[in-house]
Image (cartoon, grey):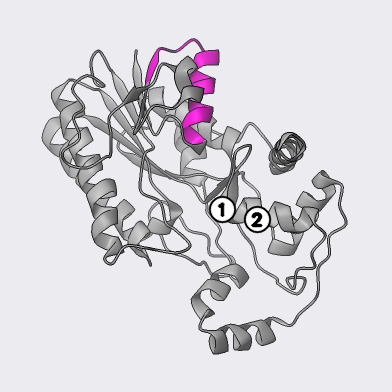
Amino acid sequence: MKILITGADGFVGSALCDRLRNDAVPFRGVVRRLKSNVVACQHMAVGDISAETDWCSALQDVTEVVHLAARVHFMTESRHDPLAEFRRVNVEGTASLARRAAARGVSRFVFLSSIKVNGELTGAGQPFTATDTPAPDDAYGVSKYEAEQRLWQISKETGMEIVVLRPPLVYGPGVKGNFMRLMQIIDKQIPLPLGAIQNQRSLIYLGNLVDAIRVCLTHPKATGKTFLVSDGEDVSTPELICRLAASLGRMPLLLPVPVSLMKRTSAFLGKKAAVDRLLGSLTVDMAQIREDLGWNPPYTMQAGVDTTAQWYRKTKATA
């Protein structure tokens, strides 16, 4: 067994490398460009990912692939045609790697997709499931769904086993983006006008996601399946803020601004879609991975939040 991990120096990839190293499982990490802080992982650089990427050396003696590398969604998109760029990396790049992997005799290809394939919001008591009709709402989600479809076709043509994971927001040591900004705001004791929100959100701690990937690499019942994964408990936005504040040793400063006022203001400012996502619910039902693989998250959400807060405090102290 030798596993190829793309995006090995990324948020999820770094944690997966650490897990496989601790488990004494042989692996090869692939990155776009080598950095001085990843020498210990013995990574290999392949450049930008597209249909033209040369995977020959990276796939040598590899038996399984975990494909994590992707073009992710940006808060401020700079490309004139974002969907075309997402397709170049996430669809064509993924399909090219999969075809070359199948030709080299790779037995299983684990693909990290996104819950955005299902959509952006769920109704009350109506979590997304693995069998829902996909309804991606942005270019990133569309590209991930199209990549999944290409993988199923390649599997049909070559016999290579495919496993797809669709996680919601991932948090943990090393997290960036909105979750990191939220911790910074809480740490600075800046009031948040989110106290009146009554939603439910699914998240997944990095350690839980890595464990799910680890199981999907070897479990015989994983092949040909799409799994939704989470921490197994859902929280409202105010509850998440309170948990983070407690872990950071801060008081949560939540202002009960009426949701109706927030919606009217967002519409006036042209931010309706972004605020709707903030106010809305997004929950997932992970019954299938529990039933098929017997998988349950090894870490509670509270343990994940505490570990993430500890990392934040340590990072802040050494900055």
Reply yes or no: does residue 24 show up in magenta: yes
CB-based contact (under 8 Å), mark 2 and mark 1: yes
The amino acid sitting under disc 2 is Arg
Residue 79: image location, x then y, percent: 31, 62
Could you classify mark 2 by the number of other residues whose Cα lies within 10 Å: few (under 14), some (14-19), or many (20 or more)?
A: few
- Can see residue 224? yes
State the residue position of label 1.
177
Residue 233: image location, x then y, percent: 66, 49
Which of the pair 50/305 is nearer the observer? 50
| Range of magenta residues | 12-28
State the residue position of label 2.
181
**Left or right, residue 132 beside residue 319:** left
The amino acid sitting under disc 1 is Gly
- Can see residue 148? no
Please report the residue visible at 29 percent of the width from the left and 54 percent of the height from the top. Answer: 86
**Left or right, residue 13 beside residue 1:** right
